[in-house]
Amino acid sequence: MSITKIISAIGNNNSIAPLIVRDCGLEGPTKIAMAYNQNKSDKYIAKNAVRERIIDEYGTSLIWLGGIPFVEYIANKLIQKRGFNPKVNLKLFKEDDVQGINKNIEKFKDIAPDAVKDLIKVRDNKGIYEKLLSSKFLSAIAIPVALMGFILPKLNFALTKKLMNNKKPTNSKANKPSFTGNMASTIANFSTVEKMAMTDGGLTVGRITTSRKKNEAIDNAFKMGGMLYLNFIAPKQISKVLDNTMNKTFNINVNLDPLMLNDKEFIAQIKENKFELPKSNLAKDIVEFIDNNPKSLFVKFAAKFNKIKMLNENVRDPRCYVDTKKLAQFKKEIEKYSEKALTSNNIQQFAKRAKLAKSVNIISNVLISSTLLAVVLPKLQYKFRKLVTGSDLEPGLIK
């Protein structure tokens, strides 16, 4: 994998790639070291704190990052056994002038007959399919939450209790709900990252509930609340600030993905002012452009960045919903980039500067958000702990 592809992946705040880098590569080791340093005045408690933090950080990361995809994989297999294709999007039941389940069935019956069969099966069994997707969503949230928020901490605490009881320190200090209609359509379209944010909320509740003492519950509430903000909100805010600053400072446009800024064909078409785009931001024009120009660069990049789904290079997947608002925004960003590039003296140099600036922003975002998570938040937590408990030591380990 090229460096550009790596930077593109970790810069996508709608994917789990930056979460993996922050959580496993930077945050975990730093928090483990800080846990030891915070409790080093009592070597016995420090040893137990470090072991608990290792199990907590990496056990939670394993479930948090892999739990939702794994549960959904199993759920999709079960849904397929019932004769349904889980790719069919429930938003298609909202028929409009552009798309809808009946409209797509009619439009694609000759060019994508297998996909149309999937649509017909869902259309004729809407209630059953809604319940299956609702159960899939609930399972993908509930199982990781139960494992991370309740089972893992209890097992972790039980291990500590057993070890501490075996070796006493000599001089230590103190019915599933179902969803239908619009609700089912909404939850079925949550991204993996949005579901991870929900599991983090459940994890917060679980960690507070399973805390061994009141002070540990308060400590966990402060930490988990900070993590929710820094994992899911702060990176997008930081990205926006960095991109806006770079655009204004150097008069460039870094709102596009580095993979686009590095693409020779993209640069050539911009230079020749031949980059084809939908004629307007209207949903009708966007969908028509996709269907009439499936091999255009606009469609190619929209598919690459998961803004649309294609069956093959000639036909979009009629089972999937086209989010025309996101595509309209994507079109606007390309237009802004093209406008600035065409006014520059050298388009190739402009593209290189834009790619370098965007790459610097992505790396800076990862470093800033990781530092906030791995260093600043724990230090604030320890100051908060000292204020509340009067001690630097882990509140759950003090006897």
Image (cartoon, helix red, strand yellow):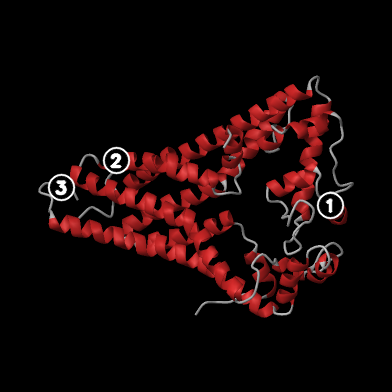
Residue 253 percent coordinates (x, y): 73, 32
Going from the N terminus, do you reach mark 2 or mark 1 first? 2
Residue pushed farthest top?
345
In this view, 197 is above or below 1: below
Residue 286's disc number: 1
- Quickly name the residue at label 3: 172
Q: Residues within 10 Å of mark 3 (few under 14, many from 20)?
A: few
Going from the N terminus, do you reach mark 3 or mark 1 first? 3
Q: Out of 223 and 232, give the one closest to the viewer.
A: 232
Q: Name the residue rendered at 38%, 39% in the picture.
A: 30
Going from the N terminus, do you reach mark 2 or mark 3 first? 2
Residue type marked 2: Gln
Q: CA distance from mark 2 to mark 3?
A: 15 Å
Residue 38's disc number: 2
Residue type marked 3: Ser
Helix, strand or loop under label 2: helix
Residue pushed farthest left?
170
On the rendered image, what quadrant is the N terminus found in?
top right
Q: Residues within 10 Å of mark 1 (few under 14, many from 20)?
A: many
Residue 324 in which image quadrant:
bottom right
Q: Is residue 377 visible?
A: no
Q: Name the residue rendered at 12%, 53% in the picture.
A: 168
Residue 396 percent coordinates (x, y): 28, 55
Residue 242 percent coordinates (x, y): 63, 33
Q: Name the residue rendered at 44%, 62% in the picture.
A: 205
Q: Residues within 10 Å of mark 2 (few under 14, many from 20)?
A: some
Helix, strand or loop under label 1: helix
